[in-house]
């Protein structure tokens, strides 16, 4: 069930491919699973269903779903940035495994890692839920399921590696801190000596922040096509930022 070394090294590319497949839903060219029309995305279909259930008129339904997507996008961006600030972007972006969800000298017992062991994966999944709103229904289901499976496989690959490197300290950490569902209160005391690198983390997580801002600023035009275009632009911006932004080396 755990991810292979190839999957781990190329996890960002695999995520990208899964998102593209979700938006394009190429199977619809052979087997028509989704409706057609300007509102044939999850956003439009769910809004119509909510209106028929008399939850509110269709305008209210669109707004409620957009608000949920904005909340997911910003929560995902914040979690990823918070975690990246303590791990360092060199570790986050590297294709190899490190003693991180840990620092190179031990377990990171600071920031979001006091509440949940995998804040970056959780942040990615929340971002996925926001993006799914813009996909055709079959594409949204495909992406949510496959991203979820990929996240689990990556986690199951990392945990034995970390346990082998860190031993009993990591096992004890896992007993206290939940894997994916965050605790309301910190489960460990925390290490006050660790200083977060917020500037580098914000640059490294520019993609998720651009997506969140796009939903908040342009979502009120009620155009899924416009938001998809914003997602593509956000991805391009993140590639430029990653190429130009200074990142500490991985030791």
Image (cartoon, grey):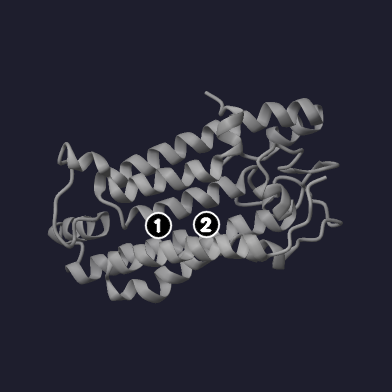
SS assignment at label 1: helix
Neighbour tally class for label 2: few under 14, some 14-19, many 20 plus, Cα within 10 Å? many
At x 45%, y 63%, the residue is: 71
Image mark count: 2
Q: In which quadrant is the C terminus drawn?
A: top right
Q: Which residue is mark 2?
A: 76
Q: Position of residue 101 (x, y in %)?
A: 71, 43
**Lower position in the chain sequence, tag 2 or tag 1:** 2
Q: Residue at x 17, y 62 (%)?
A: 38
Tell me, yes or no, whether the two marked residues, 2 and 1, touch with CB atoms within 8 Å: yes
Q: Nearer the viewer, residue 58 or 105?
A: 105
Residue 79, visible in the rendered structure? yes
Q: Is residue 62 above or below residue 192?
A: below
Q: Is residue 74 visible?
A: no
* Pick the front one: 250 or 98: 250
Residue 96 as seen in the image, left or right of residue 130: right
Q: Residue at x 52, y 57 (%)?
A: 76
Where residue 240 appears, x then y in whole percent?
Answer: 58, 64
Residue 99's label in the rendered image is none
Mark 1 residue crowding within 10 angstroms, few (<14) / some (14–19) / many (20+): many
Up the image or down, 200 lies above or below 187; here it is below
| x, y percent for residue 86 | 74, 55
The image quadrant of residue 111 is bottom right
Residue at the image position 27 percent from the left and 69 percent from the top: 223
The residue identified by callout 1 is 130
Q: Disc 2 to disc 1, how far (Cα)? A: 9 Å
**In the image, residue 152 lies at what x, y percent?**
52, 34
SS under mark 2: helix
Q: Is residue 201 above or below residue 6?
A: below
């Amino acid at each position: 069930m755990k991810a292979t070394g190839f999957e781990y090294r190329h996890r960002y590319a695999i995520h990208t491919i899964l998102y593209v497949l979700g938006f394009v839903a190429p199977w619809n060219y052979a087997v028509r699973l989704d409706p057609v029309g300007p509102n044939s995305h999850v956003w439009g279909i769910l809004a119509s269903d909510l209106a028929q259930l008399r939850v509110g008129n269709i305008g209210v339904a669109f707004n409620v779903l957009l608000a949920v997507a904005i909340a997911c996008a910003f929560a995902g961006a914040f979690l990823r940035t918070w975690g990246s600030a303590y791990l360092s972007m060199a570790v986050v972006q590297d294709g190899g495994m490190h003693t991180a969800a840990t620092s190179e000298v031990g377990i990171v017992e600071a920031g979001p890692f006091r509440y949940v062991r995998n804040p970056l994966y959780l942040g990615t999944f929340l971002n996925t839920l926001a993006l799914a709103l813009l996909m055709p229904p079959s594409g949204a289901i495909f992406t949510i399921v496959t991203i979820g499976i990929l996240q689990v496989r990556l986690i199951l690959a990392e945990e034995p590696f970390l346990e082998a490197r860190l031993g009993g300290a990591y096992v004890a950490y896992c007993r206290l801190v939940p894997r994916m569902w965050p605790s309301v209160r910190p489960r460990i005391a925390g290490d006050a000596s660790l200083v977060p690198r917020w500037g580098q983390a914000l640059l490294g997580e520019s993609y998720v922040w651009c997506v969140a801002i796009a939903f908040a600023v342009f979502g009120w035009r009620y155009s899924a096509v416009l938001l998809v275009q914003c997602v593509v632009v956000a991805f391009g911006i993140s590639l430029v930022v990653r190429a130009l932004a200074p990142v500490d080396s991985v030791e």
